[in-house]
Image (cartoon, rainbow, N blue to C red):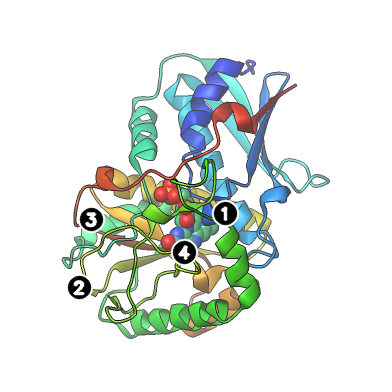
Amino acid sequence: MTSALDRDSVLAALSVAVRAPSIHNTQPWAWRLRDGVLEVRADRSRQLAVADPDGHSLILSCGAALHLTEIGLRASGWDVEVQLLPDAADADLLARITGRRFGEPDPECVELAEAALRRRSDRRPFRPDEPPAELLDLLAAAGSMEHVSVEFPPRHSDERINLAVAVSWADRIEREDEAYLAEMNRWLRDPDVHAMVDGVPVDAFPHVPDDQPRHLDVPQRDYEVGWTGRQLIERGVDERPMIGAVITATDAAYDHLLGGISMMRMMLAAEQHGLSTCVLSQAVDFAAFRTRVQGLMGWVGYPQMMMRVGYPTAPTAELAVTPRRSAEAVLQVG
Ligand SMILES: Cc1cc2nc3c(=O)[nH]c(=O)nc-3n(C[C@H](O)[C@H](O)[C@H](O)COP(=O)(O)O)c2cc1C
């Protein structure tokens, strides 16, 4: 038995789904509601030609948005069925969501939807204390599913040193590429100047003066390419955040979609337990990087996503909210 999804329920769900993270806040997604069935589609016009030639980050971002769509619908009372990549002839059709019946909101999904609305990428240094092992296990369990596993290399292990080397190496290659820097520059925004609906605002990333570098063992993506970050951070902190890696058995579009779902599930679990997260994706941006990191780390599968995890130094609510396009702007009906 199926039941037609209605526009109002879908718009309510999309107001949650658009809060998904996406590479450079490109929001490379689109939804179509046709005959009561909701489709989640990749919007290739928003794909990064240099940083994401294969659409890996695009599909990951859409996977996160797909997961929040399901959460949003369940939070409004819909029981739904989700089919991933339902049409082999239409690779950009990432999922088809069918309503089964409308009833009571799922309380767990109501809480997850609230967490999704609160979540922000936290690029500040985290507190030095390590989250307890049980909490990291809980995050790993949230992100694990069939074909997907999660690793948190211990802070003082050889594995962690290898991970730091891998991210530094990838970060350096990207930063030496003028085309990559120019493309990133086009997605940076000054909210005082631009009417923002996409891109990364300067108040969402920190300013790091040359004479006061951050003490990071795993470098973050540097957004200060022609723009000065406005986020205030504490200096002199020796940062060793936990890094979680989402690993899939193979490295095709299906894995990228699952990688995005897994990333989102971990972020929501982190948010619910007072932990901050931020994607750290340099070492997984390109297929060649993922293969190299897999070999270096000795992982059985391919790393799809890495994420910094730790306790925030100040409440996440103090972070600037990165804007999104509205639910109406990303939904086509009919
Ligand atoms: C595939 C992917 C890759 C990303 N890579 C990075 C990254 O390397 N460094 C970073 O600070 N943020 C990264 N982000 C986070 C986005 O910049 C962020 O989600 C977007 O700007 C929206 O901001 P918000 O998460 O605070 O809502 C990435 C997000 C996704 C989904």
Estimate how packed mark 2 is, as few (under 14), some (14 to 19) or many (20 or more) residues with alpha carbons within 10 Å: some
Of callouts 1 and 4, which one flags the residue occurring earlier in the amino acid sequence? 1
Circle 4 sits on which residue? 227
Of callouts 3 and 1, which one flags the residue occurring earlier in the amino acid sequence? 1
Circle 1 sits on which residue? 60
Estimate how packed mark 4 is, as few (under 14), some (14 to 19) or many (20 or more) residues with alpha carbons within 10 Å: some
* Residue 173 placement: quadrant: bottom right
Whether the residue carrying mark 1 lies under 8 Å from ligand 1 is answered with: yes
Of callouts 3 and 4, which one flags the residue occurring earlier in the amino acid sequence? 4
Please name the residue shown 38% across and 43% down the image.
321
In the image, is residue 81 above or below residue 156?
above
Circle 2 sits on which residue? 237
Of callouts 2 and 1, which one flags the residue occurring earlier in the amino acid sequence? 1
Circle 3 sits on which residue? 312
Q: Name the amino acid type tagged 4.
A: Trp
For the N terminus, the image quarter is top right
Q: Name the amino acid type tagged 2.
A: Val
CA separation in Å, label 1 and label 4: 26 Å
Please name the residue shown 22% across and 57% down the image.
311
Whether the residue carrying mark 3 lies under 8 Å from ligand 1 is answered with: no
CA separation in Å, label 2 and label 1: 31 Å
Q: Is residue 111 left or right of residue 68?
A: left
